[in-house]
Amino acid sequence: MQRLTLIIPCYNEEDVLPKLFQRVDAVAATWGMDYEIICVDDGSRDLTWEMLKAQNAKDTRWRCLSFARNFGHQTAVSAGLYFASGDAVVIIDADLQDPPEEISRLLAKWRDGFEVVFATRKKRQDPLLKRILAWGFYRLLQRMTPLPMTRDSGDFCLLDKKVVVVMNALPERSRYLRGLRTWCGFRQASVVFDRAERAAGLPQYTFTKSFNLAMDGLFSFSAAPLRMATYLGLWVSAFAFLGVVFTFVQKIFAEQFGRIGLAPGAGFPTIVISVLFLGGVQLICVGILGEYIGRIYEEVKGRPLWIIRDSVGVVPPEGK
């Protein structure tokens, strides 16, 4: 019998967990297959881990991991993928903004032969600024990467077992899973849904975390920022050359320029502006290089992606 693995990363989710347990259990009967649910506690400071263990005591299909500290959302999902044993794997957040009721639609596409099925957000109940930034980021990423990145789709998706095997074999640390699933290829399809408000509790994905995830997506899948730095240098050089030509002509035809209010001056403001402008361009280019070098530094250290403090009912699949 085919098996489904549901991966749910959790971080300080004690307020929403009772609703999560109820809604997932209610829809699980519609899946028509055996299943396991792997909840990854990403170093929560509230009662999340105690509640997950209590749920496992009620139903052993709810299996739980607890990290030694907060390693981040993408790492928590990666740990779930590592321990997943299902023929199909669904990733969903604990806050119920991605409805568990939509999993049946993802499974239907999978049964039609698609190996990656991602959920695309038609509407999302988020603050206006977040919606605008997300809209702009997805389109910027799509333009700047050679991969066919999907617009308006988060981590809520279904992956076939063969895709999970490939993703688990990828060694990189700055993991942008939405890009990795696209990079893997295979047959892909989408399901459109309306994203709801958070069911309970406070959002755990802050602006800083969202920004860092966006940077991981951009710098992990595109060399465009490096090319942009080159183009910026060329434009600044061209602008500086035109400035030299203008100054030279201005000195020769000083009287004529004086009649239109552009008489040559001492040049001190121009020097200050030029120094500040060139300094800003240099800092931008150094910052872009630093982003790539910093990621190389993290990769070469070779530290484990996560450290498990405790687990309930989770056993590594055969061969791992």
Image (spheres, helix red, strand yellow):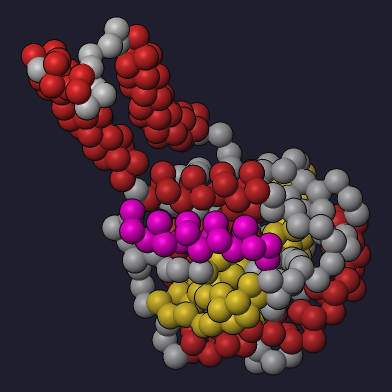
Which residue is nearer to you in this view: 218 or 265?
Answer: 265
Which x, y percent locates residue 34? 67, 83
Q: Residue furthest front?
A: 259
Across the whole image, how many numbered discs are drawn on residues?
0
- Regarding residue 102, the answer to whether it shows in the image is yes
What secondary structure predominates along the stretch shown in magenta? helix
Up the image or down, 35 lies above or below 13; here it is below
Which residue appears at 28% of the width and 35% of the height? 232
Which x, y percent locates residue 12? 82, 53
Which residue appears at 32% of the width and 13% of the height? 271
- Give the position of the C terminus as an image quadrant: bottom right
Up the image or down, 55 lies above or below 177; here it is below
Would you identify the image quadrant in which residue 129 lies?
Answer: bottom right
Which residue is nearer to you in this view: 18 or 215?
Answer: 215
Up the image or down, 145 lies above or below 285; here it is below
First to last magenta residue range: 126-144
Which residue appears at 52% of the width and 69% of the height? 153
Would you identify the image quadrant in which residue 151 lies?
Answer: bottom left
Up the image or down, 180 lies above or below 61; here it is above
- Give the position of the N terminus as an image quadrant: bottom right
Which x, y percent locates residue 240? 21, 24
Which residue is nearer to you in this view: 278 or 225?
Answer: 278
Which residue is nearer to you in this view: 176 or 123?
Answer: 123
Would you identify the image quadrant in which residue 184 lies?
Answer: bottom left
Which x, y percent locates residue 154? 56, 66
Horizontal relation, residue 307 to residue 180: left or right: right
Horizontal relation, residue 282 to residue 10: left or right: left
Horizontal relation, residue 139 to residue 122: left or right: left
Which residue appears at 42% of the width and 86% of the height? 113
Q: Say whether residue 255 is magenta.
A: no
- Regarding residue 171, the answer to whether it shows in the image is no
Q: Say whether residue 132 is magenta.
A: yes
